[in-house]
Image (cartoon, rainbow, N blue to C red):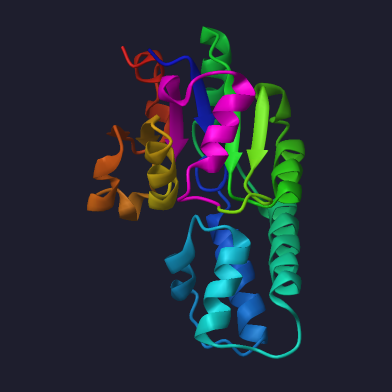
């Protein structure tokens, strides 16, 4: 039986994936990297430094370091989040449902620590979480399972008794590698992507989440 729930953040709770794509497109274009806005979809769910390293290998630039470029992207995303950010349908309700049925909750995100804190503050979500884990300072981010394992450890719950909620294929791989049950909530146009078959369940939105799915009954 599920004893704890671990949430991803970007694309699951926050309608923020477009912000990452916009910030990356603007930043890389200014550096002369020949990419389209659609190209940024290749790296959805990746940690920001992974994204920067990827595009630097494709089209090396002179001037700012990869670390400086990543910081620029993160600052832009935080600004966009504060100006235009919204929660995705069912996000707050899912957290409230976990709270109501007594399931401890953690956050496991590949996002920068400051981005995570800014989002929790802006949307007043911090009170729902007993633990929050960013992969910023880990050797590897998702699809590596470490951030999920850290979240489970912070809750004191074995990972095999945790349910992960994810939107990206990268995140689903990480959750399953951590030996967790995983429910995927992909974007509508990705709903039938066969890569999501490794998830235990695929939902159209968090509005479909109910007690039986949370508790695996």
Is residue 49 placed above or below 32 in the rendered structure?
A: above
Q: Residue furthest front?
A: 139
Q: Is residue 7 magenta?
A: no
Q: Residue at x 44, y 44 (%)?
A: 174
Residue 135, horizontal then vertical, whole percent: 62, 47
128, 3: nearer the viewer: 3
Left or right: residue 126 versus residue 39 is: right
Q: Is residue 92 visible?
A: no
Q: Could you tell me which quadrant the N terminus lies in?
A: top left
Residue 78, horizontal then vertical, whole percent: 73, 55
Left or right: residue 97 versus residue 169 is: right
Left or right: residue 42 versus residue 98 is: left
Q: Residue at x 35, y 50 (%)?
A: 188
74, 191: nearer the viewer: 74
Q: Could you tell me which quadrant the C terminus lies in?
A: top left
Q: Is residue 142 visible?
A: yes
Is residue 126 placed above or below 116 in the rendered structure?
A: above
Q: Residue at x 45, y 75 (%)?
A: 39
Q: Is residue 149 magenta?
A: yes
Q: Residue at x 62, y 90 (%)?
A: 32
Magenta segment, which residues? Answer: 141-166
87, 70: nearer the viewer: 70
108, 74: nearer the viewer: 108
Residue 83, horizontal then vertical, whole percent: 73, 54
Residue 156, horizontal then vertical, whole percent: 59, 18
């Amino acid at each position: 039986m599920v004893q704890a729930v671990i949430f991803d953040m970007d694309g699951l709770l926050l309608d923020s994936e477009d912000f990452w794509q916009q910030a990356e497109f603007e930043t890389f274009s200014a550096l002369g990297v020949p990419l389209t806005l659609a190209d940024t979809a290749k790296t959805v769910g990746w940690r920001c430094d992974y994204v920067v390293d990827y595009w630097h290998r494709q089209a090396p630039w002179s001037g700012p370091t990869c670390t400086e470029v990543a910081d620029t992207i993160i600052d832009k995303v935080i600004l966009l989040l504060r100006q235009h950010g919204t929660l995705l349908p069912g996000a707050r309700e899912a957290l409230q449902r976990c709270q109501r049925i007594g399931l401890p909750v953690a956050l496991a995100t590949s996002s920068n620590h400051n981005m995570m804190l800014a989002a929790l503050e802006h949307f007043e979500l911090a009170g729902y979480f007993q633990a929050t884990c960013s992969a910023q300072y880990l050797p590897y981010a998702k699809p590596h399972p470490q951030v999920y394992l850290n979240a489970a450890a912070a809750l004191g719950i074995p990972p095999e008794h945790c349910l992960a909620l994810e939107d990206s294929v990268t995140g689903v791989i990480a959750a399953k590698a951590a030996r967790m049950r995983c429910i995927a909530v992909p974007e509508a146009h990705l709903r039938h992507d066969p890569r999501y078959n490794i998830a235990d369940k695929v939902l159209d939105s968090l509005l479909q989440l109910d007690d039986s799915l949370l508790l695996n009954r």
